Image (cartoon, rainbow, N blue to C red):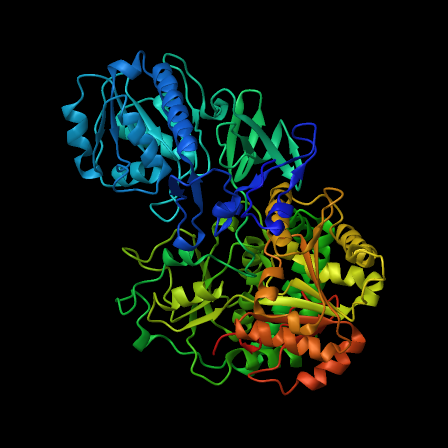
C-alpha cells in the first residue's frame, strides 16, 4: 500500500482493515475521510490537477476529492465509455442518432462539480444542448425530430415539474436522473419521482435511467432497462463498468460480496486514492448489481433532536406575518383551573399513565421501535421511576411547569423524530394544566402503530382533553389550523430552536442539544459496568439524557514493560460485555454499519478502538490522558460519541472526583450543551453538595444507572416546562 509522506501516522493507522473482502488483510477508505484536510492527506498522486467537491447541503460538510493529470484522464475515458455504452442500450444507436439536453450547468458555472465535468466530457463526443428549466419546453419542441435524452438531477426534474415546464418527448427518448433533492426541492420517493417524470414528459418509466456517482470516484453506475424490454422498479439494479468491484460493509471491518450494508467500491482507475472506498450509501448487493436503500444514519447524535433544515420548512410563518388563529396580541391566556378540577385530572391521568406504561402493547411497540425488548423494558421502568408519586407531587410539578411569567393557553408542540417517549411528558403535563395542544406528528411516527400515536389516543379518552394533531408536512400558508395556538414548544438541537424562534412571532419554549456524561473511578469499572451500560444505551443512546462520554479518574500508569492497552484490556472488555448484556440482542444493522465511521473518526483522535466481537456488542473507544490539564474543549469534543452504540471513554490520572466533575461541567457549559452527569453513590454525595452553588445553575446530577430516569417535576433541563 502506498503511503503519502504527508500522511500523518495517525491517519495511516486509522485506515480500517478488512479480512473478508479480498482474502488477505487490506485497507479500505471511509468516504468521510475526504472531509476537511483528509483529501490532501490521503492523496497518492504526484500533483493535483483538479479538485471536485461533494454536493453537501452546507459548505461545512462538503468533501474534496483531488485528481492528478493521469487520474483525470482515466476518469474522463471511463466516464465517456460507460455513458455511451448505456446510451446505445437504451436508445438504438443512441450515441449517433440522438441529441442530449442537460439541465446540469456546464463546468464553467459549476467548476467544482464532477457531474458537470462528466457532462462536459460527454459533450465533446456527442451533441449536448445546455438549457435552463425555463427554456426546457422550447428546447424539447425545437429538437423533437429525433430521439432525445434529458440529463438532470432529481431536484432539477422536480422543480421543472412543479413549475409546469414539461413537454412530451419524441418516441424513443429517455430521461437520466441522478437522485438527490435534500434541501433543494420537496422530498419524494424514487417511485413518485419516476411516476411524475413519466407523466410530465410522456415517457414510460422504463425510459428513465438513474445514474449513481460521486466526486470521490472515477466511475459511475447506471440503473437502466435496455430498449424494448420491461422491468419493475423493484427488479432494477445499478451496475458499474467492468473491472469495478463492489462489496457491502455489514459492520466494522466486515465486508462481504452479497447482502445489505454500506456500499464499498473498488475502482482500479482511482489511482490517486488506491483503496476501496466505503461509502455512506446503504445497498443490497447481489449478482445482478446493487440497489440503493438510502443513506446510513451517520448524522451526529443530538439528543431529542431535529435538523435545522427540517425546522426551516416547518409549519411556522415568517416573523411578523399575519397568522390565522395565532394573533399574539389576542391569544388566550392561561388561567389556573379550580383546584378540584386539577385534582380530578391528576387522578384520571395517573390511572391512564399507569395502564399505558405497564401494558404489554406499549412494551411491544417500544421494543419494535428500539429493536430490543430489554432496552424497552428498562426505558419504561425509567419512565415509571420519574413519575410524581402522589397528588401533592403532581400539584407541585404543575406549579413548577408554568413558572411566574404570563402563559399562553394554546400550544403547538413540535416533537423530534428520534424517539417517541419525549412527547409523553409535555402532553401529560399540558392535560393536567388544562392547556390546549396541537401536535405536529413527526414523519417517522405519522403512520402505523407506535408509542406516540398510542399515547395520544389514550389521552383523547380523558374528559376535558383539548388535543389535535397535524401531519409533519402540514403548512400554515394557505390553510387554517384546526385550532389556534399562542406559543410553541419544541425539542431539537440549539440551532434548530434558534431557527424556529426566527420564523415566528410567537413565544417559543425550546429545549436544545444536551450531552450527558458518566464519571467514575477507574478501579470500579468492572463492578459498575452494567450501570454504565444502562446510562449509555437506554433508548439506543438517542435520548437527550443518555451518556455520551464516560470519564474515569485515577487511572494508574502502566507497569514497566506493559503497553497502555494492557491496563485497559479488562475494564474495556467489561464495558463492552455489559453493553451486550443490557441490549440483549443484535444491534440494528443500519446502526452497526455506522460504527465503522465512528471507529475511523475516534481512531484518528488517538483513541484505542475495541471493535464489537459480535453483532450484539457496542463499539468501545478509550483515550488515556496523563493529567486533567490535558482535558480541554477540543479533546472532549472529539471524544463525545456521535453514533449510537458507541461507548467512548476518557481516562485521566487524577484522584479527585470533584475536580473532574467541575472540569467536565465547565467544558460542557461553555458549549451550552451541559446535560445529566451520573456518578456512583459515594461520589454523588460528595459532589452534590459542593456543586449546589455552581453558577449560572447547578448541573443535573444523578445516581449511576439513572441517567435516563426523567423526573416529571414540571421542569426540563432545570427550567420551567412552559415558561422561560
44 relative to 589 in the view: left or right? left
551 relative to 92 in the view: left or right? right
Q: Vertically, is 270 above or below 604?
A: above
Q: Vertically, is 364 above or below 213?
A: below
Viewer-side residue, 58 vs 290? 58
Viewer-side residue, 81 vs 269? 269
**Residue 597 placed where, x, y %?**
59, 47
- State the quadrant of the N terminus: top right
Q: Count the marks.
A: 0
- Which image quarter: residue 257? top right
57 relative to 271 in the view: left or right? left
Q: Vertically, is 391 above or below 232?
A: below
Any part of residue 648 in sight: yes
**Residue 708 placed where, x, y %?**
67, 65
Viewer-side residue, 70 vs 286? 70
Any part of residue 713 in sight: no
- Outermost residue, bottom side: 693
Viewer-side residue, 239 vs 343? 239
- Which image quarter: residue 175? top left
128 relative to 392 in the view: left or right? left
**Residue 289 placed where, x, y %?**
53, 23
**Residue 712 placed where, x, y %?**
62, 72
Q: Residue at x 27, y 70 (%)?
A: 320
Q: Vertically, is 514 above or below 157?
A: below
Amino acid at each position: 500500500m502506498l503511503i503519502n509522506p504527508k500522511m500523518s501516522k495517525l491517519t495511516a493507522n486509522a485506515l480500517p482493515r478488512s479480512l473478508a473482502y479480498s482474502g488477505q488483510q487490506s485497507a479500505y477508505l471511509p468516504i468521510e475521510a475526504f472531509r476537511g484536510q483528509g483529501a490532501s492527506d490521503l492523496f497518492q498522486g504526484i500533483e493535483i490537477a483538479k479538485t471536485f467537491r461533494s454536493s453537501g447541503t452546507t459548505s461545512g460538510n462538503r468533501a474534496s476529492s483531488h485528481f492528478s493529470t493521469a487520474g483525470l484522464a482515466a476518469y474522463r475515458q471511463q466516464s465517456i465509455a460507460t455513458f455511451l455504452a448505456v446510451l446505445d442500450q437504451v436508445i438504438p444507436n443512441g450515441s449517433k442518432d440522438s441529441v442530449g439536453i442537460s439541465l446540469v450547468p456546464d463546468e464553467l458555472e459549476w467548476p467544482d462539480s464532477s457531474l458537470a465535468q462528466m457532462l462536459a466530457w460527454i459533450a465533446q463526443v456527442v451533441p449536448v444542448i445546455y438549457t435552463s428549466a425555463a427554456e426546457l419546453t422550447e428546447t424539447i419542441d425545437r429538437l423533437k425530430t429525433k430521439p432525445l435524452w434529458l440529463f438532470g438531477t432529481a431536484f432539477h426534474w422536480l422543480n421543472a415539474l412543479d413549475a409546469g415546464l414539461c413537454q412530451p418527448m419524441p418516441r424513443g427518448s429517455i430521461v437520466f436522473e441522478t437522485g438527490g433533492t435534500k434541501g433543494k426541492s420537496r422530498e419524494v420517493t424514487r417511485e413518485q419521482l419516476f411516476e411524475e417524470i413519466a407523466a410530465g414528459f410522456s415517457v414510460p418509466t422504463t425510459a428513465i435511467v438513474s445514474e449513481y456517482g460521486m466526486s470521490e470516484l472515477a466511475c459511475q453506475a447506471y440503473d437502466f432497462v435496455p430498449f424494448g424490454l420491461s422491468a419493475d422498479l423493484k427488479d432494477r439494479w445499478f451496475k458499474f463498468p467492468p473491472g469495478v468491484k463492489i462489496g457491502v460493509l455489514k459492520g466494522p471491518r466486515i465486508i462481504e460480496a452479497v447482502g445489505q450494508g454500506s456500499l464499498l467500491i473498488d475502482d482500479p482507475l482511482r489511482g490517486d486514492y488506491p483503496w476501496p472506498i466505503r461509502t455512506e450509501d446503504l445497498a443490497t448487493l447481489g449478482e445482478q448489481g446493487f440497489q440503493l436503500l438510502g443513506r446510513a444514519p451517520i448524522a451526529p447524535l443530538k439528543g431529542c433532536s431535529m435538523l435545522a433544515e427540517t425546522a426551516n420548512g416547518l409549519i411556522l410563518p415568517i416573523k411578523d406575518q399575519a397568522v390565522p388563529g395565532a394573533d399574539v396580541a389576542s391569544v388566550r391566556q392561561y388561567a389556573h383551573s379550580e383546584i378540584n378540577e386539577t385534582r380530578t385530572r391528576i387522578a384520571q391521568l395517573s390511572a391512564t399513565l399507569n395502564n399505558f406504561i405497564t401494558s404489554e402493547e406499549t412494551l411491544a411497540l417500544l421494543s419494535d421501535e428500539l429493536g430490543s425488548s430489554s432496552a424497552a423494558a428498562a426505558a419504561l421502568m425509567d419512565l415509571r421511576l420519574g413519575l410524581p408519586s402522589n397528588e401533592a407531587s403532581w400539584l407541585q410539578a404543575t406549579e413548577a411547569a408554568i413558572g411566574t411569567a404570563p402563559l399562553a393557553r394554546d400550544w403547538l408542540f413540535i416533537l423530534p423524530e428520534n424517539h417517541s417517549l419525549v412527547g409523553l411528558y409535555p402532553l401529560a403535563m399540558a392535560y393536567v394544566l388544562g392547556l390546549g395542544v396541537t401536535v405536529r406528528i413527526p414523519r417517522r411516527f405519522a403512520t402505523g402503530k407506535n408509542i406516540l400515536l398510542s399515547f395520544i389516543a389514550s389521552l383523547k379518552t380523558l374528559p376535558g382533553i383539548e388535543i389535535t394533531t397535524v401531519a409533519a408536512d402540514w403548512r400554515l400558508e394557505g390553510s387554517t389550523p384546526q385550532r389556534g395556538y399562542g406559543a410553541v414548544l419544541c425539542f431539537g438541537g440549539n440551532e434548530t430552536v434558534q431557527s424556529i424562534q426566527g420564523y415566528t412571532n410567537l413565544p417559543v419554549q425550546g429545549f436544545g442539544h444536551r450531552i450527558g456524561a458518566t464519571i467514575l473511578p477507574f478501579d470500579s469499572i468492572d463492578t459498575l459496568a452494567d450501570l454504565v451500560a444502562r446510562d449509555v444505551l437506554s433508548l439506543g443512546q438517542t435520548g437527550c439524557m443518555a451518556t455520551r462520554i464516560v470519564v474515569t479518574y485515577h487511572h494508574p500508569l502502566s507497569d514497566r514493560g506493559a503497553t497502555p492497552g494492557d491496563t485497559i484490556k479488562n475494564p474495556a472488555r467489561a464495558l463492552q460485555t455489559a453493553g451486550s448484556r443490557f441490549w440483549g440482542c443484535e444491534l440494528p444493522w443500519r446502526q452497526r454499519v455506522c460504527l465503522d465511521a465512528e471507529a475511523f473518526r475516534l481512531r484518528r483522535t488517538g483513541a484505542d478502538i475495541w471493535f464489537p466481537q459480535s453483532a450484539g456488542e457496542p463499539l468501545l473507544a478509550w483515550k488515556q490522558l496523563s493529567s486533567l490539564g490535558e482535558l480541554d474543549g477540543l479533546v472532549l469534543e472529539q471524544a463525545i460519541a456521535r453514533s449510537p452504540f458507541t461507548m467512548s471513554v476518557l481516562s485521566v490520572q487524577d484522584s479527585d472526583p470533584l475536580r473532574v466533575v467541575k472540569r467536565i461541567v465547565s467544558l460542557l457549559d461553555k458549549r451550552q450543551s451541559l446535560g445529566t452527569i451520573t456518578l456512583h453513590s459515594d461520589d454523588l454525595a460528595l459532589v452534590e453538595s459542593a456543586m449546589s452553588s455552581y453558577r449560572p445553575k447547578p448541573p443535573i446530577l444523578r445516581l449511576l444507572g439513572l441517567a435516563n430516569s426523567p423526573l416529571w417535576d414540571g421542569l426540563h433541563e432545570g427550567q420551567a416546562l412552559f415558561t422561560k
